[in-house]
Image (cartoon, coloured by chain):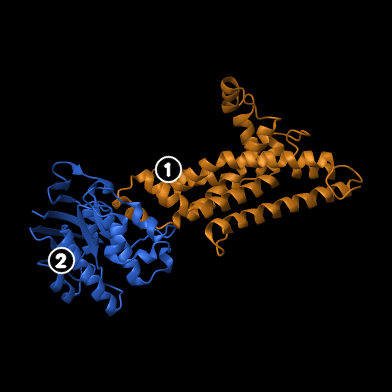
Chain colours: A blue, B orange
Amino acid sequence: MSFDIALTYRAGESTRQCTIRSEANLVAVTGPSGIGKTTLLNCIAGLDRPLSGAISIGDTTLFDSAAGIDLPPERRRAGYVFQDLRLFPHRTVAANLAYGQRHEAHWMTQAEAFDFLGIAHLARRFPATLSGGEAKRVAIGRALLSAPRFLLLDEPLTSLDPGRVEEILRLLERIRDELRLPTLLVSHTASEVERLAREVVTLAPP
Amino acid sequence: MTALPTAAEWAIIALSLKVSLVAVVLTLPLAYALAWLLARRRFAGRILLDAAVHLPLVLPPVVTGWVLLLLFGRTGVLGHWLEQTTGLVFVFRWTGAALAAAVMALPLMVRAMRLSIEAVDRRLVGAARTLGATPWRAFASITLPLSLPGVMAGAMLGFARSLGEFGATITFASNIPGETRTLPLAIYTELQLPGAETSVARLAIISVLLSVAALVASEWLVRRSHGRRAHVL
């Protein structure tokens, strides 16, 4: 099972429930804004604490309120691409990519990541000087280089011009087909969901 | 009469710099820890701690000096214990002038650092954690470097405040030439003497030059490390 998630969590003022059970390696999460999609990703990454439930991804249990399991974020190994990217402003692109890098034999090197994402020429730049599309690719690269167990992508295509959207979509398809990491994609764009996801979970008000 | 400081004036300058430097350098880690606590943690007694840190800013300095005397005098609770265990004495010593300066500078240092810690985006710390950083590494690699301009500003403000410290020092450590008579105390002493207008003016000019130098030096340091548009004040 790629995803086995059943959670009760607080999003804003209300309590939400969400169940995701899937074998697919890319699952899209959709729903109206304010429904708690980002909070759900934060709960899975360990940045927010759910009220109760359990999260298993691949063969690892990250959280289980009944069993008292609650791994800290640094041990969950999420490759989290935030909607607001959160590149470290005081570090160059290369230093951002190196921040969480795990040097594992089977995983990509920084040079391979630069190549995969087409960002080698940006290595010495600071995040403030990057365009939206460049910053997005750097954020994806930083998440990939940490050799994550799974990916969390929060609205990866927003605030991009149309040419860049196609470029990032192709990149996400390559990640899905070549790296085969379990991936949760939060999106409210139907075309994007249709093209990338084999399974869709829709969050709705109770 | 020469334009350059006399030997006696150099001695006063050296004492003032020593007192202020020791006060700021030793207070820096405590001030940063307090600033971090007040900026990032919600705990019982937080308002009380906040008030206690700010007290020297709002109390008459002579009251702060008197409280220090009660606590750190040779018969004071802490003063007696420190003398027994470490041999450290504050009253009538330059260490007392440094302690008084440190207490008076602390609130300004904490305020500057707290503002810059609050300005560090907490979401960046969260991002660092998902990338495998322990809370300590996330602090050392994200919060600390990004709040460094505030540390510089705090240190500079604390240093300037220490150079100017008068009331708490004269109350707590007294006005001993060569030991606790820093620039402001020397100016005050000269003012008590008839016909000392020239030496008062000379000391006052030195005081202005030192403060301006501290300001310029810290601005220069921050610009050098954080780019041209960065500033400490």
Q: Residues within 10 Å of mark 1 (few under 14, many from 20)?
A: few
Residue A117 is situated, as x and y percent measured from the top left of the image, at 28, 65
Q: Chain of mark 2?
A: A
| Position of residue A165 in the picture relative to residue A205 (left or right) | right
What chain does badge 1 belong to?
A: B
Residue ID at (47%, 43%): B33
State the image coordinates of residue B135 (x, y, percent, origin top left). Answer: 35, 45
Determine which residue is flagged by label 1.
B45
Q: Amino acid at mark 1?
A: Gly
**Displayed quadrant of residue B6:** top right
What residue is shown with label 2? A28
Q: Is residue A167 left or right of residue B172?
A: left
Is A112 or B192 nearer to us in this picture? A112
Whether residue A144 sits left or right of residue B218 in the image: it is: left
What is the x, y in percent for residue A162? 27, 79
At x 24% / y 52%, what residue is drawn?
Answer: A147
Placement of the C terminus of chain B among the 4 image quadrants: bottom right
- The quadrant in which residue B69 appears is top right
Labels 1 and 2 share a subunit? no
Distance of label 1 from label 2 (alpha carbons): 45 Å
Q: State which mark lies toward you, 1 or 2.
A: 2
Q: Residue at x 66, y 43 (%)?
A: B61
**Residue A113 appears in the rendering:** yes
> Looking at numbered disc 2 in the image, what kind of residue is underneath it?
Ala
Query: Which is more toward the observer, B98 or A121?
Result: A121
Residue lying furthest bottom in this view? A162
The label number, if any, that marks residue A100 in the structure image: none
Residue B42 appears in the figure: no
Image vertical order of residue A197 relative to residue B19, above or below: below
Callout 1 secondary element? loop
Residue at horizontal 28 percent and vertical 57 percent from the top = A143
